[in-house]
Image (tube, helix red, strand yellow):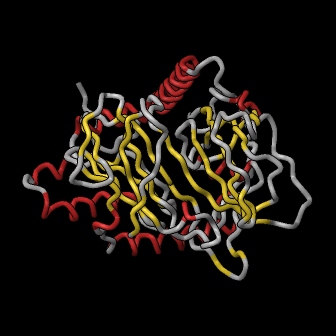
Amino acid sequence: MTRMPFGYPAHPLLQINRPLRLSSMAAEAHANSSQLQPENSPQTLADYPVPLSPPPPLLSKNVELNRALTASSKSSIFSLSRNDVLFEDEWLIAVNKPQGIYCESILSSVRSLLIPHQEEIGKLQEFHLSNRLDRDTSGVTVVTKSHKVAAKLVKAFTDHMVKKTYLALCVGSVPKWNKNVVKSGHGRSKHGAWRIYAVSDVGRTLPGGSYVRDMETLIEVLSVDGKGRSQEPLGSGKHEENTIVVKEKPEVTSCTEKSEVLVKAYPRSGRTHQIRLHCQYLGIPIRGDVKYEGVYEWKDRIYEGHELHAESLSFEHPVTEMAQSAHPSESVPVDSRIKVRFYSCIMQFPSYLSYRFRPLMCHRIVDSSKTPFAMVFSRK
């Protein structure tokens, strides 16, 4: 049998057959992939749901970049003090996260804070963040001290057994309502920004393969330009809440006069940027939140972050049946219905607000089966 020398030109048939084989394999693979796609998968961009909130303004790109760089510098040298601790026991610790600090720095700072008080250093490796706040959101952050407790709290958050309240200082037109429940869709395309979608779009596919998910928030107006509105307990029958089911883009008002609006938000789902998006939709974007149309400059002052504060967390303690009172030396046994509530009052809000929002921090654990909750304050 005669061997071909190296570099001998290939037979013309080989030059034709190989490309044909590759192209046929590619066509076959494309056909198979088409068969694997869901029947309701959008085929063109026109088939995808349309976001109802606008994209981030051009200003936000540079502002957010500068804020991120500043936060990285601050976070690298940040450390917690004992004054930042709202509550601590054997299983978890709650701290007051400042604005402009990343949550990862809170976790590492908790480790450093507890090393002198931790007998077994190995346990420090089991620390987990139970709730994550945005870089510029301040307030209550809970860190667990073991994998088992972390798993239980994750399940509590997933099952919506954790109640959260937030305070937000907004700038926009004066709301004609006192309480609104906003129901909408929530999602983003691949590498895109979070946007609001219609409720009817929940479950539909977005570009990149993600889905529109449901989102719900109760928002209550506390004051306008420093003048408080009469506050009634939820469910009292006064100032009944309205329900807004998002179906279309918000109405654009021609009012150029803006006011400072302090709101309290009760998120009923746990979506990213949920409160920020719903405040934007209601026409009262959070002050300093340039990503969602909040003012960057207000009354001759530039704001280096959005003014949103995680005021409280309430959940059933994952382990203990002992209630820690306002004084560390006292404890009261209660049953398994005990609720842990952490309150952290915002510091950057103006002094004209009521005493509840001045630089106070407090915590208390109460039995949910007894009298309504009463906060106990302790000044920093």
Residue 371: image x %, image y %?
46, 36
Residue that lies at the very extreme toward the front in this rendered image: 371
Residue 298 higher or lower than 20, as above or below? below
Identity of the residue drawn at 66% across and 49% down:
277
Where residue 246 sits, quadrant-wise, is top right
Residue 30 higher or lower than 251, as above or below? above
Q: Nearer the viewer, residue 14 or 183?
A: 183
Q: Is residue 293 visible?
A: no
Where residue 308 sits, quadrant-wise, is bottom right
Residue that lies at the very extreme toward the left in this rendered image: 119
Residue 301: image x %, image y %?
66, 80
Where residue 146 sits, quadrant-wise, is top left
Q: Is residue 144 left or right of residue 205?
A: left
Identity of the residue drawn at 48% across and 32% down:
160
Identity of the residue drawn at 38% across and 35% down:
367
Residue 94: image x %, image y %?
34, 53
Of the 4 image quadrants, the one containing the C terminus is bottom left
Residue 363: image x %, image y %?
38, 53
